Structure formats: structure tokens, C-alpha cells
Image (spheres, rainbow, N blue to C red):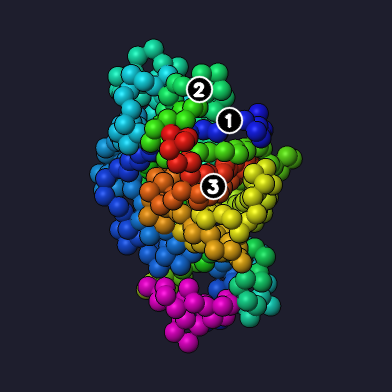
Amino acid sequence: MRTVEELIELANTHLGTALAPADAAAELTELAEWDSVHLLRLIALLEQELGRPVPVDAVLQARSLRDIWAVAVGA
Amino acid sequence: MARAVGAPPVHVLGTGTALPGEPVGNDRLAHRLGLPSAWVETFIGTRTRHFAVDLDSGRVRWTLEDLCTDAADRALADAGAEPSEVAFIVLATATPDALMPTTAALLADRLGIEGAAAYQLQSGCSGAVQAFAVARALLAVSPSGLGLVVGGDVCSKHLDLGQDFHELPPGALVNYVLFGDGAGAAVVSGAPRGGARALLTHLEHRAAGFGVPPGQRVEWFGAADLRSGDGRRPAVTEDYKAVEHRVPVLARQLLDALLTAAGWRPETVDYLLPPQLSGRMTERITSELGQGFEWEPVSCVAETGNNGNALVFFQLDRLLPRLAPTQRALALAVESSKWIRAGFTVEAPQEASDA
């Protein structure tokens, strides 16, 4: 997974969200269809996609999809 | 009966509770479900819960009837009352062991109560208040009799421990970390009696979701449903977004309604028994409702998990030893099924003259 856009595509495909690339930098609390259960499901998806555990504590602190992506890929 | 202001109070003579087995912490639950424990801590905020089922083997260790029997035994002992004095039982649950016979009738047998009336309510988080309301109506006819009010749930009945949790829809997944099992009971009378621990004075329960879709749905499946494929739907689903949004609003409306009915100024209230959803949501609602007041919160959900019809009994069980003469409490419950708001005011019994 090289870009945050790929993470957004992953979420849209598996979580039923309709996030746009422009949502990458938005505060998660501002995203109408995003919530803590989506975050939980995304962690599992990322681990599956990357083939390794992601640092959950850091992901839980993330404030945007871009933050989540950066933590997940270790950018 | 939506509300009966001015009806005689319910005298609570004793309470008791029962939790199955050891507390299950987030690490153990999360490991069993393949979820990150930190997520449960951060977003749910419930630290422990108890399950009637053994998490490892899936074996059922306690029935609802077992838990209700333990809670009722303790309530009778707390009240210094004998089973033979009980004239009626009202039991509230969303998860009866069977549709028939009722758990209420089986409980009477287990307690050795012969010939009492045994009512059972199909209810959720507002069930305890509804059961107290039915008890009050029964006590109005026969004030000196004793009633046994019981509430409990075995939510783990719905935990399918064999499934892939990564595939579960969000509305079904949250239930695995929110709920727990347990039962509570209270012995009540309509007349003053020595040793009364508290009076439930103004009591209200009403449907508060006219035209609004249910926030929670619990299915039951018969043989025909299973054959037609209907039994493959998740048994419990929750619109947790709607719950997050509506419960604080309904709790506020209920609080205002109870204060008005009782004619209490908010600063004269000592304790708040807030709705018990999850550790985190209850904390949020408590701080929003109590802003500007020194109400001491009485909660249990962070330790017991959301055990539905038992919650209010656990809160009462924690309140009564602390309730000093002249003190007051407000109990609020919101059921997100078809949106029911239910609560009561609690007053310490007056000294000797009333006892």
C-alpha cells in the first residue's frame, strides 16, 4: 500500500463507505459515515493487506485517514 | 400506564444481585474475539463483564433462572423476609431461558414460593422500572403484601463464539464487547415497614420514539424461520449511531420530567443513577447531565458490562448502603429498542415515625 488513496479504496471496498480522496486529511470526527467500529474493521483489513500487525495504540490516536495510513505503513 | 404521579411510593426493603463466574477483562475478551484490546478500552470503556457461558468451551454454566434465584435469595435475606411472605413476582428480561414456562414461574418454584402470582415482562434496559411500575400497581391493591421485583439477562446466549469476527457487520460486532450477564432483585412493599431502605416515589416510563425506527432488535427464531433461512440473520443488531445520538437526549428529557413531577430543585439531589450503556457512554452522559451540580454518580456498567434488565438493580444495590436520611436520588434508564425512557425518584425513608 503506497498511498493514502489506496487505503481509502480499501475502506470503500470492504467497509461500505463512500470516502473520497479529499477526505484523507479531514478530522475523523468530521467524516459523517466514519466511526470507531469502522476504525476497528480497518485495523483488521490493514493487517491482512500488509501481512503484519499495525501499531494499534498509535492508530487509535490518529486524527485523520492520512495519519492512519502513515502509522500503518510506518511512513 | 405512562405515568402515575401521586401514586403511593414503593418501599424497597432489600436488594440483591448475582453475576456469573469470574470477571472477564478486555485482554481476555479481545484475545478470544481476535480484536485489539486497546480498541475496547478506548471506545467502549467497559473494563470487565461476566458471562454465563464459558468463553473457552462455550459450555453454558448458568441459566437466567439460576442467576435470578441467587439475586432473589440475596434480596430476601437483605430484607429479612421469608419466601412465604411473597405475594407476587414481577420479572423483566429480554433473554428468558425459554418462551414457556416463564422464568418468573420457575423462579417461584426455586424459591419455594407456592401460589404467588408470577408476571414476566419482555423488556430491555427499561425493564426494571417497568417491573417496579407493575409492582406499584399490584401493591396499590394489597399494600401490606410483599412483592419480589426481578430483572436479569443472559446476553451471552447470543454470542456465537465460532464465527469470524472480521466478517461481522458493525451493528452486530459491537454487541460482543458491550454486553454481559447478570440478575438483580428487590423486595418491595406498599406500606411502611421496619427496615425499609428506600422509597421509590415518582416513577415514569413511556415510549419516546414515535415514528422513529428501533435502535436495537433482538430476534427469536422458530423451526420454520430456520428452515426458510431467516435464522441466518444476526440475532442481535444495534443502530449504535442512533443510540449514541438519542440516548443522551432522552436521558435529559427524563431527568427534567422527573424533577418536575417530584417538585425537586436539581441542587437538592444527592445521587444520579444514569443510563448504563457502556463505560464510556455512561461517563459522557453523566458528565453532561451533572454539569453544575454535585450529584454523586452511581454506575455499574464498567464492571458488570451491559446486563440489560439487571442494571438498575445493580445501581440500587450500590446506592442503598450510601443513602443517608433525607438524601435523594434520580434513576434514569433508556431502552433503545423502540426508545423507552424510564426512571424514578428515590428518597431515604423517614426515620422511626415511618418505619
SS at mark 2 in the image? loop
Identified at 40% across, 25% down, the residue is: B103
Please state if B136 lies on the left or on the right of B55 as rendered: right
- Name the kind of residue labelled 3 in the image: Ala
Q: Are marks 2 and 1 in contact (CB under 8 Å)?
A: yes
Where residue A51 appears, as percent x and y from the top left, is 38, 72
Q: Earlier in the sequence, mark 2 or mark 1?
A: 1
According to the image, label 2 marks what residue?
Answer: B143
Tell me the subunit letter for badge 3. B
Q: Earlier in the sequence, mark 3 or mark 1?
A: 1
Closer to the camera in the image, B319 or B109: B319
- Name the kind of residue labelled 1 in the image: Pro
Q: Is residue B194 above or below residue B102?
A: below
According to the image, label 1 marks what residue?
Answer: B8
Tell me the subunit letter for badge 2. B
Please state if A28 lies on the left or on the right of B44 as rendered: right
Between the residue at mark 3 and the residue at mark 1, the CA separation in whole angstroms equals: 18 Å
Where residue B166 appears, as percent x and y from the top left, is 44, 57
Please state if B301 lies on the left or on the right of B8 as rendered: left
Closer to the camera in the image, A31 or B311: B311
According to the image, label 3 marks what residue?
Answer: B331
SS at mark 3 in the image? strand
Q: Residue furthest right?
A: B211
